[in-house]
Amino acid sequence: MEADPELTKAFQELQAKKVEAVQHLDSLDAKIAGTARAVKISELTLAEVAQQDASAKLYRNVGRAYFLSSKDKMEDLFRSKVTRLSENIRNFNDSKVAINNELKEAENSIRELITKKRQGPSS
């Protein structure tokens, strides 16, 4: 029995799509892990800043330079950083869900094609 060229092509496309999806998912997992580490660091730094007296001298780095900053500004800076990074993590997770859904759709379309091919000759 000879393989149907349409099915062969569909399986090759699915395999290529799966390989690409797995690579993209691995990349997103790495980004999520790195961003989660950055969130944790920012949260810990925010906790340390919050423990300081309002009169304490706090410095924030900008590139290679350090600038004197107030406690309130430092807390705002780290809160906004945590919020931004958390939003990035949510976006990465949404992307992962979308990629998985696309992959499932492709698999379902191949299943439908196989079912159609099986029913076609007998009809």
Image: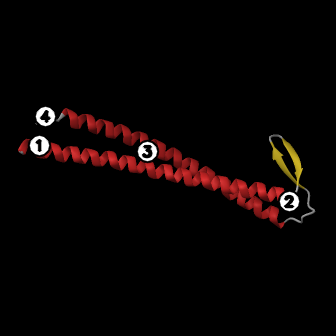
Q: Which label's residue is closer to the chain start, 1 or 3?
A: 3
Q: Which label's residue is closer to the chain start, 3 or 2?
A: 3
Question: Circle 2 sits on which residue?
Answer: 71
Question: Circle 1 sits on which residue?
Answer: 120
Q: Which label's residue is closer to the chain start, 3 or 4?
A: 4
Three-letter amino acid code at the position of disc 3: Val
In the image, which is nearer the foreground, mark 3 or mark 2? 2
Q: Quadrant of residue 117?
A: top left
Question: Circle 3 sits on which residue?
Answer: 22
Question: Circle 4 sits on which residue?
Answer: 2
Three-letter amino acid code at the position of disc 4: Glu
Query: Residue at horizontal 60%, vertical 51%?
Result: 88
In the image, which is nearer the foreground, mark 1 or mark 4? 1
The CA distance from mark 3 to mark 4 is 30 Å
Task: Determine whether the residue tagged by mark 4 lies in a helix, strand or loop.
Answer: loop
Q: Position of residue 107 (x, y in %)?
A: 30, 47
Q: Which label's residue is closer to the chain start, 2 or 4?
A: 4
Q: Nearer the viewer, residue 61 or 87?
A: 87
Q: Which label's residue is closer to the chain start, 1 or 4?
A: 4
The CA distance from mark 1 to mark 3 is 33 Å
Judged left or right of residue 119, residue 7 is right
Q: Position of residue 21 (x, y in %)?
A: 42, 43
The CA distance from mark 2 to mark 1 is 73 Å
Query: Residue at horizontal 81%, vertical 56%?
Result: 74
The CA distance from mark 1 to mark 4 is 16 Å
Task: Determine whether the residue tagged by mark 1 lies in a helix, strand or loop.
Answer: helix
Q: Nearer the viewer, residue 20 or 104?
A: 104
